[in-house]
Image (cartoon, helix red, strand yellow):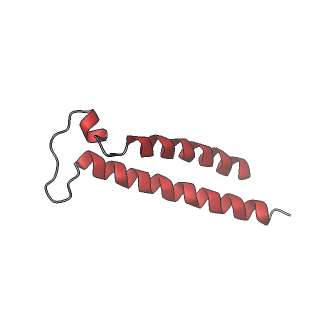
Amino acid sequence: MSTLLTVLLVITSLLLILLVLLHKGRGGGLSDMFGGGVSSSLGGSSIAERNLDRFTVGIGVIWFACVIALGLLLAYQN
């Protein structure tokens, strides 16, 4: 079980690094990289940016759950 959680933690860590680098900084982001000039007037971000935000939060929750589960598993393994 601990091996599975460790592998999942490594995969989600790499995905989080990639997703954070894709986010919009001061300049362009994912939407500008692919030529997206169509953005919502309400939120100020395109659909691609909002979906990227949702995906990043989801992966972050999975990463956090893996860290907690692995910590509890290793603490109570004795």
Q: Is residue 35 left or right of residue 70?
A: left
* Residue most extreme to the top: 34
Residue at 22% of width from left, 48% of height from top?
A: 46
Residue nearest the observer in this picture, 72 or 42: 42
Count of residue discs: 0
Q: Position of residue 31 (x, y in %)?
A: 26, 40
Evaluate whether residue 1 shows in this view: no
Extreme residue toward the right, this view: 78
The image quadrant that residue 42 belongs to is bottom left
Residue 49: percent from the left, percent from the top?
29, 48
Q: Is residue 45 above or below residue 38?
A: below
Relative placement, left or right, of 53 versus 39 is right
Q: Position of residue 20 (x, y in %)?
A: 43, 46
Quadrant containing the C terminus in the rendered view = bottom right
Quarter-wise, where is residue 27 in the image?
A: top left
Where on the picture, by quarter, is residue 24? top left
Image x and y of residue 41, in percent: 13, 55
| Rendered residue at 77%/60% (across/down) | 74
| Res 72 seen here | yes
Tell me: 10 left or right of 57.
right
Give the residue drawn at x 66%, y 61%: 69
